[in-house]
Amino acid sequence: MCLRNGFRLVLLISLLNVVAFATPVWGFAENVNSAVRFGGWSYHLEDEVVENAPTYNENHLGLGVDVGLYRWGNWHIQFSLNYMKDSWDDHLYAASITFDRPIDFEFTDWTFALGTSVGVQSRSIMNDHNGEFTGFSRRTLPLIMPYARLGTKDFFTLFTVYPQFRERINVADGSRSYRLENPVVFWQLGFTL
């Protein structure tokens, strides 16, 4: 386990070096910042509705990299890679393209942006049989996440609300269905490169 985490750390540091040094050289983005995001805290807007289910993880220990790709008018387009612990304290990996529209306030260094991420995530979801907890399964799911970003030109906080997925298994016929649960409020810190 320690070796695997060490490998992930080396891989992440290598990726950060590529982002930090290659962005200006390759000219990925003109006036579009790259960023590093870390932390990740959440508040689930429901109590566990499945009997005997574990409690939600609210501290996600995340790390993400946003690589500025293109500026189209006032819109910024970035490629994002993220890792964190999901709601069930399992590994979550995500890759997405983000589109956001920053609004700079002329009288201060503060900036505000509204945007969305569209991509894919690999994460665990809770399984239940007729409301009884049975375990977790790993799924690759679409990622569509609107967000707001508030901060200075160097540091920011990202806020979002996203859906919680649950797999339901019908005991009678074994069929599976997926449903959306109450959403989760999530925030993360970051700094621009």
Image (cartoon, rainbow, N blue to C red):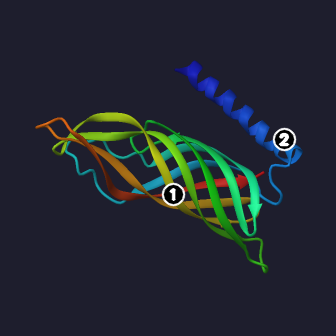
Give the residue drawn at x 40%, y 37%.
139
Specify the amino acid type for callout 2: Phe
Q: Which-is-in-front pick, marks 1 and 2?
A: 1
Callout 1 amino acid: Met
Name above or below for residue 19 compared with residue 97.
above
Residue found at x 59% / y 60%? 158
Is residue 46 visible to the viewer in this orientation of the structure?
yes
**Lateral position of residue 184 relative to residue 29, left or right:** left
Labelled disc at residue 21: 2
From where the camera sits, is residue 34 visible?
A: no
Q: Pointer 2: residues within 10 angstroms few (<14), some, or many (20+)? A: few
Q: What element carries label 2?
A: helix
| Other residues around mark 1 within 10 Å, as few (<14) / some (14–19) / many (≥20) | some
Residue 20 location (% of width, % of height): 80, 43
Q: Residue 145 carries which label?
A: 1
**Mark 1 element type:** strand
Q: Position of residue 185 (x, y in %)?
A: 45, 59
The residue lying at 73 percent from left, 69 percent from top is: 74
Q: Which one is earlier in the sequence, the residue at label 1 or at label 2?
A: 2
